Image: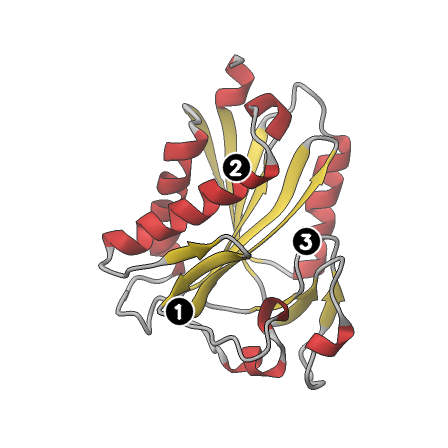
Amino acid sequence: MTELSKQLTLRYLGSQPYLETWQAMSDFTNLRDELSRDEIWVVEHPAVFTQGSAGKAEHLLQQSDIPVVKSDRGGQITYHGPGQLIVYLLIDIRRKAFNVRSLVTMIEQSIITLLNDHQVQAIAKPDAPGVYVNGKKIASLGLKIRRGCSFHGLALNVDMDLSPFLQINPCGYAGLEMTQCKQEGITLGVSELAPLLIEKMNQQLQYSQIESVFHE
């Protein structure tokens, strides 16, 4: 493992528009080279539906004033909004010697471990990426791999308005119920859970040199 594979820039971006953040992720991935450090971005988005690259229009059940953005990540339609912890992983998976499946498993296990620490029993499903509590989905995943590097990532429902999920078939599953940390008895907010989740993820990603950057 090279020294560079242990270096990470961790960016706390606050609340940012989805489209601009997606464009920035895409630009970063297009421009990076073998000497670029990996980055992880922690962010919240204003209300938006995002449709995956193979997304089917019929999974949007009703129109509303919430915009719909067609994205290049994997998966179907999902919702992002305030009170949801979003973590984007801009990782050179070739340098890390990961494959996509192992990265997805690492993400899922990190969320499960975090929830278990707060006495919430959660599971992953082999046929439906994400994390579930008593059959309800609490975290969604969607990744894109380009030039051996990942972008997009995960969304963990923390303390948000879940009603927009009723306007869609979440992740393409009709009738899939959503839950969130607050409903499961976890009182910590997004800003408190974010570093705890990053710590769990890094137990698997194994970065030893982490530079944290806080954006206004």
The amino acid on which the numbered mark 3 sits, given as a three-letter code, is Gly
Counting residues from the N terminus, which is met first, the one under dot 1 or under dot 2?
2
Q: Is residue 142 left or right of residue 42?
A: right
| C-alpha separation, residue under disc 2 versus residue under disc 3 | 16 Å
Dot 3 corresponds to which residue? 74
Q: Is residue 170 left or right of residue 12?
A: right
User: Residue 95, located in which quarter of the rendered image?
Assistant: top right
On the image, the x and y values in percent for residue 85 come to 47, 58
Dot 1 corresponds to which residue? 180
Counting residues from the N terminus, which is met first, the one under dot 1 or under dot 3?
3
Q: Is residue 4 left or right of residue 145?
A: left
Answer yes or no: is residue 69 visible.
Answer: yes
On the image, the x and y values in percent for residue 14 come to 51, 55
Tell me if residue 146 comes above or below residue 79 in the rendering: above
Tell me if residue 34 comes above or below residue 90 in the rendering: above
Q: Nearer the observer, disc 1 or disc 2?
A: 2
Dot 2 corresponds to which residue? 102
Q: Secondary structure at mark 1?
A: loop
The amino acid on which the numbered mark 1 sits, given as a three-letter code, is Gln
The amino acid on which the numbered mark 2 sits, given as a three-letter code, is Ser
Residue visible at 68% across and 20% down? 34
Residue visible at 68% across and 65% down? 50
| C-alpha separation, residue under disc 1 versus residue under disc 3 | 22 Å
Counting residues from the N terminus, which is met first, the one under dot 2 or under dot 3?
3
10 Å neighbourhood of mark 3: few (<14), some, or many (≥20)?
some
